[in-house]
Image (tube, grey):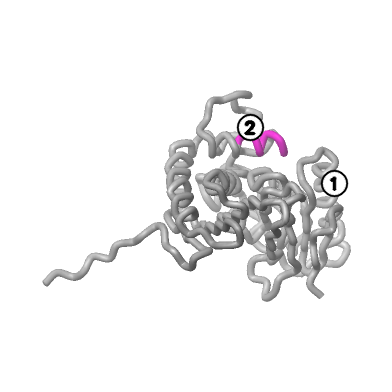
Amino acid sequence: MSDPIEVFVPVRVLADDLILVDWGPMTMTISVWDKDRARPVMAAIASRSALTCLQVLSDFQGFLKIPVCRLPSDPQLPDVVSRAFIAAAKVSKELTPLAAVAGAAADHVADVALQMGADKVIVNNGGDIALRVARGKTAVVGLQAIGAEKMAGRLYVRGEAGIGGVASSGWKGRSYSPGVADLVTVWSSSASIADAAATLIAGNITACGINVEQARAADLDPTSDLGDMKVTTAVHDLSPSQRRRALDRGAAVAAGMYSKGLIHGCFLSVQGDFNLLDPEGIVQIES
């Protein structure tokens, strides 16, 4: 008798309010509600669009790794690629669309669920989160750095706030960064813009010295869109002044984005020190 064949299912129902899409580079959870009831069927239908996004993004790998400033100004693109391109272009034309691609996929899937009649949708694509929250509803998002034992705080997103995405970046994240931030979390009108903004802000939270180790991105991964850029591989104990100067650089970039209406706010953290831009008062810091 032959051994049983193990079949891997890319979409699984973990709970009525939690559908998991786990396939290739994508680990996404989808939660959908309507009238305070979990809607797993809506979430499962939306999950199909997540798998379609994966295929489309694979087809456009080369395009996504080119800085926006070197791409055509008005290319004809599939929805998920277009979202990433537009978000990167709004934040900085020096970014590649890849800087916004996780948020763009989350946005695409969230809008599919929204169009089915949901009044609250949370799509978490590896930490980049699309939110679709109707007036009168609230979503709570935790602020927690990779490897941290506890959350730094919580973000309370109300439906009337106009926030459609929360994204995080840092030197320990999935993508390389030239900065030293443990956590940069940005909230904006979309997950794709928040994703690109978090990437750029984190990259500006820099420090120099023997306590910061870096390497060429291409040496770590020949396929990286960052090429010859030096990215951070380790951060040892920074002095208080190093931490403060690094945070000040990131805060200045964030303030510029806020003044342009690109972001609603952000939380920046370096080795226990933090800076908070929260004009709408929606963050609760843990004591």
In the rendered structure, the answer to whether residue 175 lies left or right of residue 41 reads right
Question: Which quarter of the rendered picture does the C terminus lie within?
Answer: bottom right
Q: Is residue 91 magenta-colored?
A: yes
Residue type, mark 2 in image: Val
* Pointer 1 local density, CA inside 10 Å: few below 14, some 14–19, many at least 20: some
Q: Is residue 274 magenta-colored?
A: no
Residue type, mark 1 in image: Ala
Q: Residue at x 53, y 64 (%)?
A: 17
**SS at mark 1 in the image:** helix
Residue 215 position in % (x across, y down):
63, 53
Residue 219 position in % (x across, y down):
55, 50
In the image shown, does 90 or 235 lie closer to the viewer? 90
Count of marks, rendered view: 2
Q: Is residue 50 visible?
A: yes
Residues rendered magenta in the picture:
85-92
Relative to 259, residue 38 above or below: below
In the image shown, does 212 or 89 lie closer to the viewer? 89
Q: Report the disc number at residue 68.
A: 2
Q: Residue at x 72, y 68 (%)?
A: 236
Q: Residue at x 36, y 60 (%)?
A: 9
Q: Residue at x 60, y 27 (%)?
A: 71
Question: Which quarter of the rendered picture does the N terminus lie within?
Answer: bottom left
In the image shown, does 74 or 139 lie closer to the viewer? 139
Residue 267 position in % (x across, y down):
78, 58
